[in-house]
Amino acid sequence: MIILSPFKISIFKQCPLRYKFHYVDKLYNKYKKERNYLSFGNSLHRTLRDFFQTSLEERTYENLEKIYRKNWVRKGYSSEEEERSWGLKGLKILKNFYRKEELNIKPFLIEKSLKGYYRSFGLYGRIDRADKIGENGIIIIDYKTGKIGEDKELSKISAVIYKFLLEKNYHKKVIKVINYYLLLSKKIEFIFNDKEFEDYLNIIAEIGLEILQERDFLPKKSNLCEYCDFLEICPAYK
Ligand code: SF4
């Protein structure tokens, strides 16, 4: 059975050959590159995860910074100077976050991997944070450490997967999914009515079928190729 996740779908949509290298040929570990933006994203995700696991009294800005320093991932930076500049960018983000966010909350979930089944497909997603709202409602928060500019359809597909998995696993109602762009303190919300939700689940199943039926796995060159770990073996660049 094929397991679909937001990342897997985004890779297939970006480039079938990249998908093949990664998931069919399993060359990921061999060609994996350390990248500054990935380390930066991991550092911030871990920091916010740990911060919301502290008691309310411990949620001072000093502690937030301390947790950030402890979780800082050093890989992928080309120099100490570059690392420092990303580090400072992270501090700015955290300062803004601390100033603007409601910090006295006890999240319902933090960094939780969830699995489920839709038709003949497995679904997988990792939820950054989910907060309770009202008796039975939930808001899912997906932290984004890059710039706004992701494909909107892919964002909706990810949101539907998270909503589906949380509702199936916890029997709660997900009211909305928020993509929280930390750098700009901007939140983009996704709210689905029943029909839209069903339509997107159908789209996800169709992508699953497309992947199962794919035979050619042709390369699809784009400006995203520079972030592809398989650039050095890609026939499109020979
Ligand atoms: S370099 Fe570009 S075209 Fe080649 S596999 Fe990667 S994403 Fe696809």
Image (cartoon, rainbow, N blue to C red):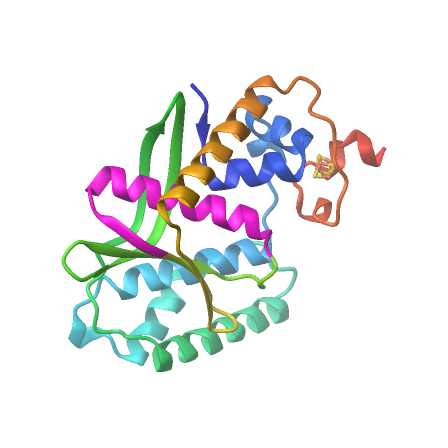
Say if 20 sits above or below 190 in the image. Answer: above
* Quarter of the rendered structure image containing ligand 1: top right
- Residue 80 is a magenta residue: no
- With 86 as the anchor, is 180 left or right in this view? left
Magenta: main secondary structure equals: helix
* Image-quadrant location for residue 49: bottom left
> Measured from the top left, where is residue 231 in percent x and y?
73, 38
Say if 137 sits above or below 112 in the image. Answer: below
- With 167 as the anchor, is 95 left or right in this view? right
Q: Is residue 74 visible?
A: no
Residue 101 versus residue 227: which sits nearer the camera? 101
Q: Residue at x 58, y 57 (%)?
A: 36
> Measured from the top left, where is residue 114 in percent x and y?
31, 39
Q: Residue at x 35, y 44 (%)?
A: 194
Q: Residue at x 56, y 72 (%)?
A: 84
Residue 219 versus residue 76: which sits nearer the camera? 219
Say if 7 sits above or below 64 in the image. Answer: above
Magenta residues (range): 150-176
